């Protein structure tokens, strides 16, 4: 066991953790933050995507001890005081969520993309989410949601709660 | 579940080299972990110690110097290389290759040196690095040696690295800065996928150099191609140097065919 200190969605956690624990299992099983999903467990699907020190990463391919000292953002940090983030609202409005399994990872990947590139083109959105599989939507609704959230769609955004 | 191991994260290179000397054969070095953790998960490897090299100061160096060229440390990720303005300006072929590797999240973790040491026939960074005449610096407690990248690979997933050694630096000489080049990677889908075959072509001052991945047990370099060589002759020369196989990603014939297609396209871009 090793002791690690991580900041998750602004809150500091100090925990003893097994050295072979992935960050994904640490979040889900040790901390009960089950918003982050496990699909493949091997870097292929992106369901486990979180933001670590400002970068989106596959948490299934990070060891919990590697995250010692890191600042982490997960889907649990998106909604504030019960109010969905702009990106979440756009996903809702555009039916970009069907089964929802890919959504937490998808949102975190797009969040990092938008931090660097606030108005991505359709191609840049498609490339950006290359590592996030969605088996339901066919991606189109997700792309439209991102375009709406970034003010790039003509039908003006009557995003529900904004 | 991953097998049980001890996690170490030395903060000094000396400490790392001591561990390597003592425990080399039973440990595995951890850079981005995108290959290592995937293999541990599959049970392909079961190290008793995992040594994280990212906490060593200086291992994150990514520096370009007009005289010395490019220096890349063991903790530098594919995205760091891809987004570096000096790399884009002076070694554009590397930027192009980096864009082809896996997905954005993977590139945020995967290191350039991990891609080399992994020694996969399909390693995306290697064909371009071979064209640029890159070399690697290998250190152990006993000392240091520099090996040209083209002599580094000895087979599928095999290299000249010994268990007590670490690849501490990748060096790309200034020789071919601003040389025009390109890289094509054939994939089964538009999204992220390992290459079916990959072709890098670099036009230097006096020759073409061609690097090919997924077409032999190790990535292959074909050099000394005079600039006025007709496309057909270049293709024949390259096809003579590779030995692709039929596998789950594609057939031998398809690979050979696409190498020809890509060389033609790259020549059109570069001529
Ligand atoms: C889903 C997925 C998709 C992928 N897609 C691609 C792709 O499209 N193209 C591609 O080329 N690769 C791909 N890969 C493979 C992998 O991501 C890359 O090879 C990556 O660059 C490896 O770097 P790393 O830092 O993650 O290596 P690690 O996993 O940390 O290390 C790889 C190996 O090298 C050793 N090692 C690492 N650094 C050193 C060092 N400095 N000295 C000595 N030994 C060292 C490790 O011990 C280990 O054995 C993919 C992997 C996954 C999981
Ligand atoms: S669970 Fe991590 S990428 Fe699929
Ligand atoms: S909504 Fe079901 S996988 Fe994307």
Image: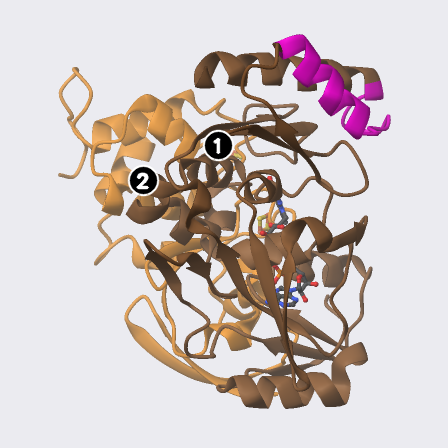
Q: How many marks?
A: 2
Within 10 Å of disc 2 (Cα), the crowding (few <14, some 14-19, many 20+) is: few
Q: Position of residue B5 (x, y in %)?
A: 72, 79
**Residue B34 in sight here:** no
Q: Position of residue B114 (x, y in %)?
A: 60, 58
Q: Position of residue B156 (x, y in %)?
A: 81, 48
Q: Position of residue A131 (x, y in %)?
A: 51, 39
Between B210 and A96, the residue placed more toward the observer is: B210
Residue to which mark 2 is pinned: B89
Q: Residue at x 57, y 75 (%)?
A: B52
**Residue B231 in sight here:** yes
Subunit of label 2: B
Quick one: SS at disc 1?
A: loop
Image mark for residue A2: none
Q: Residue at x 80, y 65 (%)?
A: B45
Location of residue B264 by image quarter: top right
> Is B140 located above or below residue A76 in the figure?
below
Between B72 and A69, the residue placed more toward the observer is: B72
Residue B174 lies in the magenta-colored region: no
Colour representing chain A: orange
In the image, taking residue A8 as reference, residue B159 lies left or right, namely right
> Dividing the image into 4 quarters, which one contains the C terminus of chain B?
top left
> Which of the two discs, 2 and 1, labels the residue nearer the N terminus?
2
Between A106 and B91, the residue placed more toward the observer is: B91
Colour representing chain B: brown
Residue stretch in magenta: B231-252
In the image, taking residue B88 as reference, residue A103 lies left or right, namely right
Residue to which mark 1 is pinned: B204
Asked if marks 2 and 1 fall on the same chain, the answer is yes
């Amino acid at each position: 066991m090793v002791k690690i200190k991580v900041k998750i969605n602004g809150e500091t956690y100090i925990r003893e953790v097994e050295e072979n624990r992935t960050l994904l299992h640490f979040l889900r099983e040790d901390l009960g933050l089950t918003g982050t999903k496990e699909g493949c467990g091997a870097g292929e699907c992106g369901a486990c995507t979180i933001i670590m020190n400002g970068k989106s990463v596959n948490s299934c391919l990070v060891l919990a001890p590697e995250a010692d000292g890191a600042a982490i953002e997960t889907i649990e940090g998106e909604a504030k005081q019960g109010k969905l983030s702009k990106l979440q609202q756009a996903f809702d409005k555009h039916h970009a969520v069907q089964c929802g399994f890919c959504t937490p990872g998808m949102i975190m990947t797009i969040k990092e993309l938008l931090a660097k590139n606030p108005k991505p083109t359709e191609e840049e959105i498609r490339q950006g989410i290359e590592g996030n599989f969605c088996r339901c939507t066919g991606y189109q609704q997700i792309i439209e949601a991102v375009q709406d959230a970034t003010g790039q769609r003509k039908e003006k955004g009557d995003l529900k709660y904004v | 579940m991953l097998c049980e191991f001890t996690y170490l994260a030395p903060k000094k290179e000396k400490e790392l080299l001591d561990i390597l000397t003592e425990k080399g054969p039973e440990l595995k070095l951890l850079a981005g972990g995108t290959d290592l953790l995937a293999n541990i998960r599959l049970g392909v490897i079961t190290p008793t110690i995992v040594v994280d090299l990212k906490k060593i100061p200086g291992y994150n160096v990514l520096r370009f110097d007009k005289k010395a060229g490019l220096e890349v440390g063991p903790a530098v990720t594919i995205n760091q290389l891809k987004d570096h303005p000096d790399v884009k300006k002076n070694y554009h072929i590397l930027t192009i290759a980096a864009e082809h590797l896996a997905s954005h999240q993977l590139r945020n973790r995967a290191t350039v040196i991990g891609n080399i040491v992994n020694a996969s026939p399909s390693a995306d960074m290697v064909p371009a690095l071979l064209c640029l005449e890159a070399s690697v610096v290998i250190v152990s407690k006993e000392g240091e040696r520099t090996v040209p990248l083209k002599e580094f690979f000895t087979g599928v997933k095999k290299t000249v690295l010994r268990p007590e050694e670490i690849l501490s630096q990748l060096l790309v000489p200034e020789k071919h800065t601003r040389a025009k080049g390109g890289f094509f990677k054939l994939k089964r889908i538009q999204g992220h996928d390992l290459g079916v075959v990959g072709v890098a072509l670099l036009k230097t001052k006096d020759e073409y150099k061609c690097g090919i991945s997924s077409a032999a047990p190790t990535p292959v370099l074909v050099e000394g191609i005079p600039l006025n060589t007709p496309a057909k002759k270049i293709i024949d020369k390259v096809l003579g140097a590779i030995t692709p196989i039929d596998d789950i990603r594609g057939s031998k014939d398809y690979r050979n065919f696409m190498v020809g297609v890509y060389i033609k396209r790259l020549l059109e871009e570069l001529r």
